[in-house]
Image (cartoon, rainbow, N blue to C red):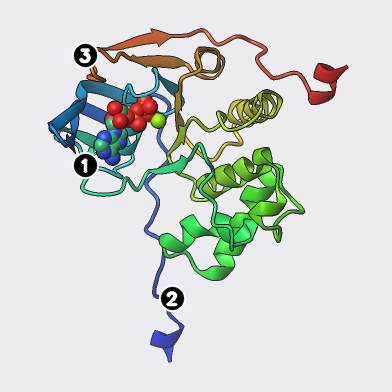
Amino acid sequence: LRALRTPTARPAARPPRAADGDVLLEATGLTKSYAGADGELPVLAGIDLKVRAGEIVALLGKSGSGKSTLLRCLAGLIPASSGSVAYRGEPLTGANPGTAMVFQTFALLPWLTVRQNVELGLEARGVPADERARAAVRAIDLIGLDGFESAYPKELSGGMRQRVGFARALVVEPDVLMMDEPFSALDVLTAENLRGELMELWESGQFPTRAVVLVTHNIEEAVLMADRVVVLGSRPYGTIRETIEISLERPRDRNAPAFDELID
Ligand code: ADP
Ligand code: MG
């Protein structure tokens, strides 16, 4: 009887909270090529990158410069061709347990409600149903979607769908939140509002993550949000030759003006 009552799938114990400055992600000599019709297409070469607790890092580059490829390598979704990626000093052998991803086109499952979509990440990590539901409702509230738990994606605007994308990533409280052009499918005003709200959450310490990697081709967005910008060059044929790191003194007031102020 006791055996029956023992929960079987407990989530793995979380590592202790990282202190600011601790290296969470580290790519060393990272190279990535894709197999193409004419042999290997090199996309990333010799990437050295550290992501530390407490910082927002932007990966900035033109379309095709390998931003998404680098993000996927850091998240352990695709393997590096050579070099290594480590999470908290441990080389990755598969999906990175310390990251969760927000996608440009939201990637919601249309047949699931908002809450069910948000619970997906927890399901994959073996969290029991009642805990999943509680955590999902918390993440949905945090991201400003309370009242929409039972809605389906098609009933929501683009901005609200991306909020679901954020809630689904934040619900697992990843050490590092990975975002791949999360605002570029949204109209300018919606994007600005969402960016502003996220930055407020981040700065108020309510964001349940320790670092953020933001992929963008938008220089303004990188400068507004990031502490550090890593520029991916792409010459020739998309081969990365160097990264340039720019440390930023973030502007003091970079909250987006409220919607009604903008249209006054
Ligand atoms: P970015 O996100 O900066 O636009 P990507 O990482 O998506 O760049 O792509 C970099 C290069 O790699 C592009 O030339 C793209 O066509 C190529 N590429 C991306 N994914 C694949 C893939 N799965 N197979 C083959 N080539 C790919
Ligand atoms: Mg991309």
- C-alpha separation, residue under disc 1 versus residue under disc 2: 33 Å
Does residue 101 appear left or right of residue 232 in this picture?
Answer: right
Task: Decide: few, some or many residues near mark 3? Use Cα within 10 Å; few <14, some 14-19, many ≥20.
Answer: some
The residue under label 2 is which amino acid type?
Pro
Q: How many marks?
A: 3
Give the residue pinned by disc 3.
241
Outermost residue to the front = 37
Percent x, y of residue 199: 61, 26
Outermost residue to the right = 264
The residue under label 3 is which amino acid type?
Arg
**Residue drawn where x is 63% and y is 45% of the image:** 161
Which quarter of the picture shows residue 98? Answer: top left
Give the residue pinned by disc 2.
7
Residue 121 vs residue 70, the one in the foreground: 70
Residue 184 vs residue 120, the one in the foreground: 184
Q: Which sits earlier in the primary sequence, circle 3 or circle 1?
A: 1
CB under 8 Å between discs 3 and 1? no
